[in-house]
Amino acid sequence: MHMLLWIFYLSSYCVLSVNAWYDCPRAVCTSCLSAEIHDAPGVGFDLTPSYGTAVAHYYNGSVVEIAHVQGNSEYLEYMARLVSSPEPQDETKTLPQHIARWLHVSDAWSRKCGRWLLKKLGYSTKDGIEIISDLLRELKDSTEREILQSLDRVAITIPDLSSLRQKTINAALEDLGLRTWLGDSPYYPKRLVEADAVYAANGYGLCKNYRNIFECTDEFEASFASPAVFLVSFSRHLLYTAISTPLYGEALAIVTTDEAQVLDFEFGLDRLFQDDSQALWDRLRQQLLVLPRESEFTVTHIFLAGESATNPRFLAVWKDALSELSPMLSQDSKMTVANSSETLNPTFAAARGAALYSRRRQEVQADCEEPPECEIMRQQGQARSFGKQDL
Ligand SMILES: *[C@@H]1O[C@H](CO)[C@@H](O)[C@H](O)[C@H]1NC(C)=O
Ligand SMILES: *[C@@H]1O[C@H](CO)[C@@H](O)[C@H](O)[C@H]1NC(C)=O
């Protein structure tokens, strides 16, 4: 073989061998998912630093935007604290570890008990898990009312803050009796960041064969694409921008982190209107340009998201900033226009990506591959139950 081709093969092998264990064939499942689980709606939440949204993605492909819940002042303060501190915050109130172990109690119970004790001792402030749980509870309740069944599992997108740990989110879910689709299996992602979810919700980076995790990734490795996704999320309370670079262009893949981000509570829409100073709007415009200007990546995709992204004055500033950006973009970069009818509602874009991820996971087992007979069995099961209804 040609020398260069060998070098090329070797170097791509080195890249791939990082994930080599991950390419091993998986065990064949010994049982099949029930149709009830397989066909259940996928539910996605988007937890932003100031509000949360919920979306359900049904098996038949229908997508419903369910709820948009503002964080209370406690939530906003907590998030502002996370943004200003790069260190993970571990402020959970639990029973001391050794006591919990001795009592053989679950983490959730230990948290409940620890909080109860502290309340008795006169401490009334909530910990981060409780604060997040409060917001998630509202999303959960609205979702259950919409899908007419109890909610068991969700995927949640979160801002890519080093101080916000997936463990905290998962504990908040656990306190509500919910399980997560993130970090539940070594084959699937531990974290879902907003930029990646919005990229997926807009139809990019989605493999066809999602039932087989390796074939899914293989669909992308051949392309050698290297997109850089620029997300601008604008809300009443803050501006959040991020650049992420999905490996080979695959969305919802096992590694999803942002390369760089700006998170600024100074530039929320509320504040901009309250102060109504041109100088503040000008600074917002500068903030919009920071990442693409400084990034080593050439932006290939641009998405607007967030509850205030359709505000006309913001859009005007955004369009103006874009004109300055265009020389820095790749020739054929893809953008969403926030107000056209065929684009997604930016408030729900990230939750849609998360719901899509849940929907896909609903059809596969985490640690094994279903044999083809499973699908046949499910269809027969359905045929039987249809038969009963007909009688
Ligand atoms: C899909 O299923 C949902 C829930 O059962 C239903 O409300 C919706 O109308 C269905 N959509 C289509 C296109 O069949
Ligand atoms: C959407 O954007 C276009 C182009 O900027 C503008 O002309 C139009 O008025 C906007 N429509 C709405 C409903 O805001």
Image (cartoon, rainbow, N blue to C red):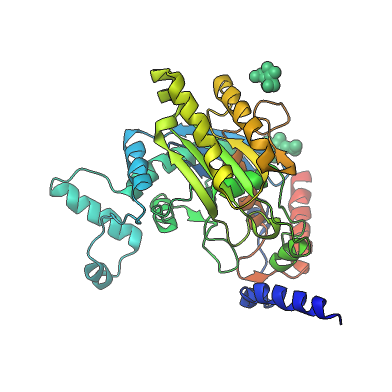
Left or right of 293 on screen, residue 2? right
Residue occupying the point 62% across, 78% down: 21
Picture coordinates of residue 39, whole percent (x, y): 68, 51
> Residue 223 appears in which quarter of the rendering?
bottom right
Res. 355 visible in picture: no
Q: In this view, does 79 lie to the left or right of 35?
A: left
| Image location of residue 272, percent across then percent down | 44, 23
Residue 275 or 69: which is nearer the viewer? 275
Give the quadrant of the N terminus.
bottom right
> Quick one: 282 or 150, which is closer to the camera?
282
Total number of numbered labels? 0
Q: In this view, does 90 lie above or below 215?
A: above
Q: Which quadrant of the render holds ligand 2?
A: top right
Residue 264 x, y percent position in the rendering: 43, 38
Residue sitting at x 54%, y 54% = 259
Tell me if residue 203 can be seen: yes
Q: Residue furthest left?
A: 121
The residue drawn where x is 26% and y is 59% is: 94
Point 76% across, 49% down: residue:
386
| Above or below: residue 158 compared with residue 284 | below
Farthest-out residue, right: 1
Q: In this view, does 138 lie to the left or right of 44?
A: left
Query: In this orientation, which residue lies closer to the viewer: 40 or 261?
Result: 261
From the top left corner, tell me how far across and down residue 379 is, in percent: 78, 57
